[in-house]
Amino acid sequence: MSLILITGASDGLGRALAEDLGASGRHQLLLHGRDPDRLAEVARATGGTPLRADLSSLREVTDLAARVAATHDRLDVLVNNAGVGFHVDGTTRELSRDGYELRLAVNYLAPVLLTRELLPLLHRAPAARVVNVASVGQQAIDFDDPQFARDHHQPAAYSRSKLALICHSLDLADELAGTGITVNSIHPASYMPTTMSSRSGMTVVDSLEQGVSATRRLVDGPDLAGVTGRYFDGAQEARAAVEAYDPAYRSRLRELTRDLLAGY
């Protein structure tokens, strides 16, 4: 029985994915969420173990990893799904508990740090997988204003964080080549009927089932065993924004990330 940690499992895609995986009876689930009541509900529905943490605090991210490591000797799959969305007309700049731009912190820095902290457990699994939930909405970070202090726009901040996560996925896949750990990113579907989508002000486009099916394939699909360093748009392998394949851009992003995560 494989051990799977899903972040953002108390609502939306994360919850639906947890319920789908739980119904198979083939997986042991670790379920991260922020809302204790919703988290308890999905834990009861799936038989998974609830793990509450606020990923806007990097200290809580490291604590989450420590709690997993204290009770398990390996991790087969890490699904970095938790995220902060946007409102289509949103211009309010929000900050994380550490003072970082909120979407950069939760959608990018938190999964990067969580993955780093859980790598020892992933190395102990025979063929571990890291699945990073990204987006087709992608935008390059302005390295002169990485915290988006000027002319802030929530959809752009979201898109910046998601391209950064795709870049990290490619870097980590290269770093872990030959270890048995695969790393892939995915845009599951567009504007599924979730709380995040309803708050965005956008019209529903795709079904939740489409997003679950596409994401689950990366989690335990036999056809993707050993496949790493790819970006998927739904069920299809795709090309991310051009910056994802630019060594100079990715190098600057790695440097920024090291600076922002220093001390954690």
Image (tube, rainbow, N blue to C red):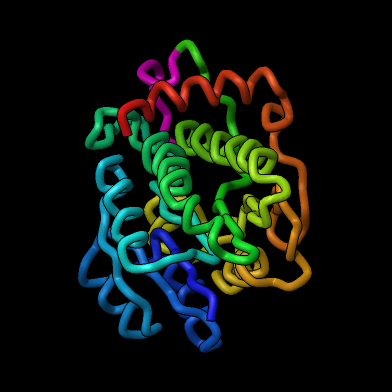
- Residue furthest out toward the top: 144
Nearest the eye: 100 or 149: 100
Q: Look at the image and give the residue range highlighted in magenta.
A: 145-154
Q: Main secondary structure of the magenta part?
A: loop
Residue 230 shows up from this direction: no
Placement of 46 over or under 239, stated as above or below = below
Q: Residue at x 36, y 26 (%)?
A: 262
Nearest the eye: 123 or 106: 123
Drawn side of residue 212 relative to residue 45, left or right: right
Residue 139 shows up from this direction: yes
What count of labels does the image hold?
0
Q: Residue at x 77, y 53 (%)?
A: 237
Residue 22 is a magenta residue: no
Residue 170 % position (x, y)? 66, 40
Residue 214 % position (x, y)? 65, 66
Residue 152 % position (x, y)? 39, 24
